[in-house]
Image: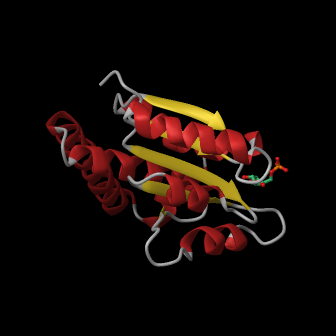
Amino acid sequence: MNKITVSVLMGSDSDLEIMKGAIDVLNNFGVTNEVLVLSAHRTFEATREYVMSSIDRGTKVIIAGAGGSAHLPGVIAAMFPLPVIGIPIKSKSLEGLDSLLSIVQMPPGIPVATVGINGAKNAGLLAIQILATFDKELAEKLNVFRSKQKDAVLEKTEKLKTLGVEKYLKILKK
Ligand code: RP5
């Protein structure tokens, strides 16, 4: 896939460290993406221009993260007819509950698929799952990812059985 299939937008560069979780997942799955800092409030004209041009350029999913009075995902969803995934960024004053409620409580008719507070990894995976509905190669990569994830958990349970709780905890703390 050479086209920009997923755009990753965030309200501030202070969100970037968290948003990297989504970007890393997209890159690991080989999904072409574009990353921008654009705010619903501070750069509303530029945000509008970018989203409108994304529609013309064939972007399939937009991931948007914002904190506090987190309007970015909802404003994007108002303009972009395809899936928008919102990431509530943990805020300083209200621990991200403000971000979560701002993003999740959309009016009927304009949905935003909202992940958990700082849930950037899941946002990346959800975007890939959406693309996998029409991309077999991605669907196969998702199967491999889940299979590896399952094996990692089963290995842990085996290790726990072998070592016992105390020794396991000691190794975890190292
Ligand atoms: C939001 O305000 C951003 O998404 C960010 O999470 C929060 C704080 O922004 P800065 O003051 O760090 O730029 O719009």
Colour style of the rendered protein structure: secondary structure
Q: Residue at x 54, y 42 (%)?
A: 51
Q: Is residue 44 visible?
A: yes
Counting the numbered discs, the total is 0
Q: Quadrant of the N terminus?
A: top left
Q: Is residue 45 left or right of residue 141?
A: right
Q: Position of residue 89 (x, y in %)?
A: 67, 58
Relative placement, left or right, of 104 versus 56 is right
The single residue placed furthest to the top in the displayed view is 2
Q: Residue furthest right?
A: 93
Q: Which is nearer the eye, 149 or 139?
A: 139
Residue 119 visible in image: no
Residue 27 position, x and y percent, is 43, 30
Which residue appears at 75% of the width and 64% of the height? 68
Does residue 132 lie above or below 30 as drawn? below
Identify the residue at image location x=46%, y=55%. Answer: 84
Q: Which corner quadrant of the image does residue 38 belong to? A: top right
x and y percentages locating residue 143 in the rendered image: 19, 45
Going 58% across and 57% down the picture, which residue do you hit? 73
